[in-house]
Image (cartoon, grey):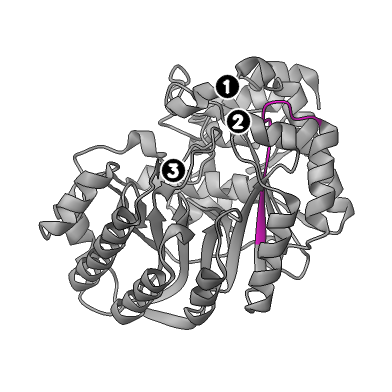
Amino acid sequence: MRTDLAASYGEERLPRYTSYPTAPHFSAAIGADTYARWLAELPSNASASLYLHVPFCREMCWYCGCHTQIVRRDGLIAAYQRTLRSEIAQVADTIGRRIKVEHIHFGGGTPTIMAPDAFAELMAEMRHAFFVLPSAEIAVEIDPRTLTAEMVEAMRLSGVNRASLGVQSFDPVVQRAINRVQSYEQTASVVDMLRQAGIQGLNFDLIYGLPHQTIASCLDTVRRSLALAPARFSVFGYAHVPDFKKHQRMINESHLPDGPARHDQACAIANALKEAGYVQIGLDHFARPDDAMAVAFEQGTLRRNFQGYTTDQSEVLLGFGASAIGHLPQGYVQNEVQIGAYQHSIADGRLATAKGYRLTEDDRLRADIIERIMCEFGADLADICARHGTEPEAMLQSAPRLKSLISDGVVRLDGSHIAVANDSRFLVRSVAAAFDAHLDPGKQLHSRAV
């Protein structure tokens, strides 16, 4: 890593650009009535993806940046599942037809905290309300510490074909520092259960930049993970934002690695996975060469949404559950974050939309540019601008941050084609941010660039 670049750009707080504009720019001006109109206006040939947020866990992992809460009583989870079913029915009724569905993703929290029969009922409700294609990818995020054989069977019968396992680190010192003690044996047992159930699409989530983490412990986690041969890895840098996530105050900041150390850990993990035959995809994903994500990356069809990199080509994402975000051609919508407020809205027969954002033509143009940069480390501005009826020169002039990136050697500009230099790809978020018209560098809303 060029230490001069890390010093210049590494401390910036920048979005991960899973959307543009990002969620801090959503406002209450977009509410339930607007969402209802947008749903009714969906084209007759539209297809959709579904995201269901289950905001419950048995205990809090101190690194977590998700909207979740700790529950001991299963009755609260059952009531929430019933609310999800009602919301699905309301959204489907508002659309007015059984829209095609190509992807379903259960996120959390811990989605498998639901009772197995409740999970099956939820899947049945979705198949009743929407036309879930036989080829649809149905993915579930899993905490291996709590998954049961009964839930695996419910997943199998419901057509689940992909599972993302939270691993983070196998180092017991790191695990204790983040309040997530999870043995290799637990993880291996879950992998075996899933494969025996025919769920072959397995993803592992790893994190670097955690307290007490070292290059050696990162590589040991990679070595153990490779022995279980998942199809994909997601490798994220820990985002320490204790002002927004109060439980992160349980992590001693003095035990966190600095920017250069974080980058060294990320590079060590990336190099080990590539040496094992995985293809590096964008900023933080890795996949086997024959995996659908690696194929999409090779063909230039990779996309980015709220789940990170994806093969999902749908322009419609319907979000269900407290805090869930949806994306429609007209803009973004987000549900009430507080579980009680979300449930009250649905119980009253109203969509639970609390805020959102109506896209402008300029937003759509910049979103396309940012997505290509994040997915391909470059963008053909002439091609993208032509599709939006504008000129690349105007876009270049509106990105003053780009000049310093070019002069520092982070970006190469060849005519209207921009490319992130190979030795500067760790700053891809900085390059994407050059086209972010909404970015306020003074607000500490995001994680560090390095």
Which residue occupies the foreground of this view, 246 or 327?
246
* Residue for badge 2: 430
Q: Comparing marks 1 and 2, which lies closer to the viewer?
A: 1
Which residue is located at x 57 percent, y 37 percent?
Answer: 432
Mark sitting on residue 365 = none
- Picture mark count: 3
Sort mark 1 into few (<14), some (14-19) or many (20+) by Cα contacts within 10 Å: some
Q: Amino acid at mark 1?
A: Glu
The magenta segment is: 203-214
* Residue for badge 1: 12
Q: Position of residue 290 (x, y in %)?
A: 76, 70
Q: Secondary structure at mark 2?
A: helix
Q: Amino acid at mark 2?
A: Ser
Q: Amino acid at mark 3?
A: Tyr
Sort mark 2 into few (<14), some (14-19) or many (20+) by Cα contacts within 10 Å: many
* Residue for badge 3: 20
The answer to whether 399 is drawn above or below residue 414 in the figure is above
Which residue is located at x 40 percent, y 75 percent?
Answer: 120
Q: Is residue 212 magenta?
A: yes
Which residue is located at x 47 percent, y 43 percent?
Answer: 366
